[in-house]
Image: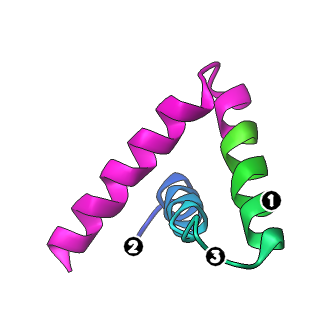
């Protein structure tokens, strides 16, 4: 069973996996705000957070 942090990480991973080419501007805004909030919370920059989640998504694709 996954703990709370793992579930939260999975949630953010799913959220950040939203395609950036989506025509829905609300999804783009949601993705941007999520990246910004995580970067602020982690004392990092948005590019770093985005790269980390892109790598996590790629690893998930390899597993499944």
The Cα atoms of the two marked residues, 3 and 2, are separated by: 33 Å
Task: Point out the image quarter for the N terminus.
Answer: bottom left
Residue at coordinates 53% horizontally, 33% vertically from top-left?
47
Residue in the picture at 69% in, 58% down: 31
Q: Which residue is mark 1?
A: 29
- The residue depicted at 20 percent of the width and 80 percent of the height is 64
Q: Secondary structure at mark 3?
A: loop
User: The magenta stretch spans which residues?
Assistant: 38-64
Distance from the alpha carbon under mark 2 to that under mark 1: 32 Å
Helix, strand or loop status at disc 1? helix
Q: Which x, y percent locates residue 13? A: 50, 61
Disc 3 and disc 1 in contact, CB within 8 angstroms:
no
Q: Quadrant of residue 25?
A: bottom right
Mark 3 highlights which residue?
22
Report how many numbered discs are placed on residues in the image: 3
Q: Determine the residue located farthest toward the top in the rendered image.
A: 43
């Amino acid at each position: 069973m996954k703990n709370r942090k793992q579930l939260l990480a999975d949630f953010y991973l799913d959220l950040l996996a939203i395609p950036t080419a989506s025509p829905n501007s609300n999804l783009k805004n949601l993705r941007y705000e999520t990246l910004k909030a995580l970067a602020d919370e982690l004392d990092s920059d948005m590019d770093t957070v985005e790269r980390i989640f892109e790598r996590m998504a790629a690893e998930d694709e390899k597993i499944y």
